[in-house]
Image: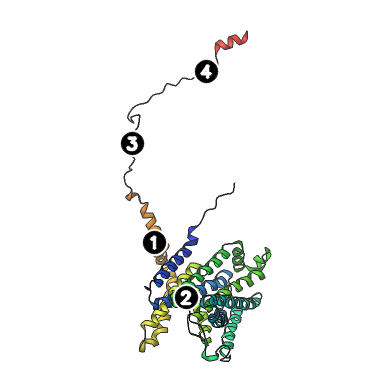
Amino acid sequence: MAAKKHIKWSHYINYAVISLATIILGVLSIVGALPASYQIIFENIAIAITLAVSLSMVVGFLGELSLGHAGFMCVGAYLGGKTVYLLAPVIGEIPALLCGFVVGGALAAVCGIVIGLPALRLRGDYLAIVTLAFGEIVWSIFMNTSEETFGGALGMPTVRIDRDYLFVIALVVVLLCLAVTQNLIRSKHGRAITSIRDNEIAARATGINVTKYKLAVFAISAFFAGVAGVLMASSNYTVQSQKFNYNYSIEILVMVVLGGMGSINGSIIAAALITFLDIKLQTVLTGELAVLQDLVYAAILIVIVIYNNAPGLKTFREKYNVKSLLGKLHNKKHDPANARDDEAKWDRVPTKIQMDEVLSVDVQVKSPYDPDKAGKGDN
């Protein structure tokens, strides 16, 4: 009989939280109880989570440093956004958006394979330089196009999908990205990918096809970056290539690093926190205080990095993190001081025999030697 598999419900917490948020926010949007400003915030958060989780596959699990993730996003935003712009008047916004996902994601995946080829021979800083150069080349090409093709320096016009349901579609894309990423990492292929990160020479010696896995990871990561680019194009009326420069790639990398290398849930939390923080600073610091936006944003990031990595705060982090607090609550429920009297006492349970009676049993031991039978047997 096959052994019964134990389901680890902790693996599905992020699915449950995001699915519940999608349903609740979708209902609030339908009834008109969700302000437009929050709809835009959730759009940006969903895009950031998709970017962070997809980049975490390359940086956190494969162990390669990529600084060109914004370049893949730029490919998806321009080519996928152009597809939506051309097809929306013909087949409608939602079908056009789905076609844009396919076109933008597929072409970005092709670019990911092209960048993955140098990754077969380059590592560390050298690969980072190649990916950085790719990102800079991509947005420079789109910036120098004509206005008839991709808008040039002024930007390419796009179709602004209705904000009442675009953030719901974006959250569904997040769930799809999580499903692909987590199922891949927790499979035998994921173990092969992490073994490449730990020791590529040992992985090759054990027969792992390093070329196949590196190209696959770069392609999947680039695909979701391209889909996130289509979402960004559909959340604005124009797309400008300057948005996808080196600084934006660094911002995505910061989300992955702050969340913890190789931690999908950490990338989700860091992406949501950084995006929300950035948007709120732009809202609060206006007018003459607008010059302080980048300064305050950078200062908060520095504080977060110090808190996560300072050796002097290790004891504090271990004592007051979410896991330890939940553990204390769980242990408090089983504290002997909180134990109550048992409801099923013997004096409350009806029995046929009184418990204070003394029961005796006569035990007779019969010897295996019977003289009568022995005498008959001799005759």
Q: Nearer the viewer, residue 164 or 333?
A: 164
Q: Is residue 127 left or right of residue 42?
A: right
Q: Measure the C-alpha gap from mark 4 to mark 3.
A: 42 Å
Q: Which residue is mark 3?
A: 349
Q: Measure the C-alpha gap from mark 1 to mark 3.
A: 40 Å
Label 4 crowd bin: few (<14), some (14–19), many (20+), radius 10 Å: few
Q: Is residue 367 left or right of residue 350?
A: right
Asked if the residue at tag 2 contacts the one at tag 1, i.e. Cβ–Cβ closer than 8 Å, the answer is no
Label 1 crowd bin: few (<14), some (14–19), many (20+), radius 10 Å: few
Image quadrant holding the C terminus, namely top right
Nearest to viewer (mark 2 / mark 3)? 2
Circle 4: residue type: Ser
* Residue 1 % position (x, y): 59, 46
Residue 166 numbered tag = 2
SS for callout 4: loop
Circle 2: residue type: Leu
Instruction: Return the residue found at the far front.
Output: 90
* Residue 214 % position (x, y): 63, 71
SS for callout 3: loop
Residue 312 seen in render? no
Q: Is residue 40 above or below residue 180?
A: below
Q: Measure the C-alpha gap from mark 1 to mark 2.
A: 36 Å
Chain-order first, disc 1 or disc 4: 1
Q: Which residue is mark 1?
A: 325
Circle 3: residue type: Val
